[in-house]
Image (cartoon, rainbow, N blue to C red):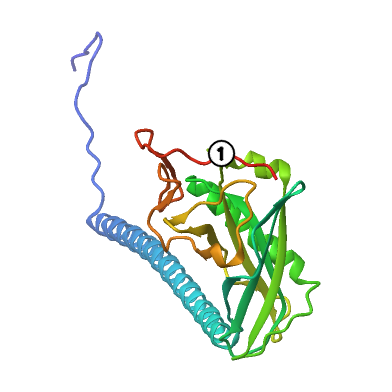
Amino acid sequence: MNNITGNIHVTGEIEAHVPPDLAKKRDAAEKKQEARDKLRFGVEVAGLVFVIIYAGLTLWMSYSAYRSAKAAMNQATTSASQLEMSERPWISFVALKDSPLHFDQFGLTLKLKFDLRNTGLTPATHVFTDVEFIPITGDQELFATFKKNACLIAEKDSASSEVTVFPGADSVEERKFFLGIQNVDKFTSHGFVMLNVIVCVAYESTDDPSKHYSSGAQIYRLTRITPIGEEGIVAHQDVPVDDLRVYPFGQTATLVVGGNYQIGADDSVIINNDSAASPPTQQNK
């Protein structure tokens, strides 16, 4: 028997094989897990989609409900407004001259008469007519301010008025108003008093005393009739009632004053320096 001495190296690979039955079970388990993962992912995606759809439907339903409620509210408001418009009083008026235009050392005085008529279906109560002098100006924003203030004053003072105008009835109101001498001089230009008259009628309804109405402010021009035509008001010269004209602003496009002095349709002042005519001078009485 031979003895082998020295180092012996053995190389190679050990192969381990899973038995076929165990491999099949492992593959089946992996496929089941994969199927469960896919199912869970699908369920999660479906749940997310459902939540998004549900949220969208909820939002749409909420918006639809809001629009329906708003439409119903608007309809109710419109119906109430239409009912109020058809049932409320409506006051219109016409301004008429009732006295000479008088100057004295204290200022300017005028009395106008107002023919009020209620064309509405309910009585107008606390009817008050506010009338004031305002300067002639072509500034439309200033005009708008004058109109707003006139109706605010009329509304404030109407609370103390005891005048009632019934449906279809007329009522005649007289108002005497005054402008101090300093303001007369302030609004005098080229010998003419550059003034208009502003009027606003405020009133309430018997159906709802909390409701305040107004006719809206109306501006009237003051002119004098002379043998040569219609002219402006000369400062410090009385105008007899028969020579006085009071008419709503806008009826005359351009008013020629004293030959070379014109007031445009927008109340702008036009001076014709080339005219041979000269404006009258102030005559203090």
Q: Residue at x 68, y 85 (%)?
A: 165
The amino acid on which the numbered mark 1 sits, given as a three-letter code, is Thr
Q: Nearer the viewer, residue 268 or 14?
A: 268
The x and y percentages for residue 260 are: 40, 41
Q: Pointer 1: residues within 10 angstroms few (<14), some, or many (20+)?
A: few
Residue 201 position within the rendered picture, expressed as x and y whole percent measured from the top left: 64, 70
Horizontal and vertical percent position of residue 169: 62, 90
- 266 relative position to 127: left or right: left
Q: Compare residues 54 and 49 and report the one nearer the observer.
A: 54
Residue at image x 78%, y 72%? 159
Does residue 211 appear in the picture of this structure?
Answer: no
Q: Is residue 108 above or below residue 152?
A: above
In the displayed structure, does residue 168 sit left or right of residue 74?
Answer: right
Residue 228 falls in image quadrant: bottom left
- Give the left or right position of residue 227, taking residue 169 as reference: left
Q: Nearer the viewer, residue 7 or 17?
A: 17
Q: Nearer the viewer, residue 4 or 280?
A: 280
Write down the residue under mark 1.
281
Query: x and y percent of residue 166 in the render?
Result: 66, 89
SS label for mark 1 = loop
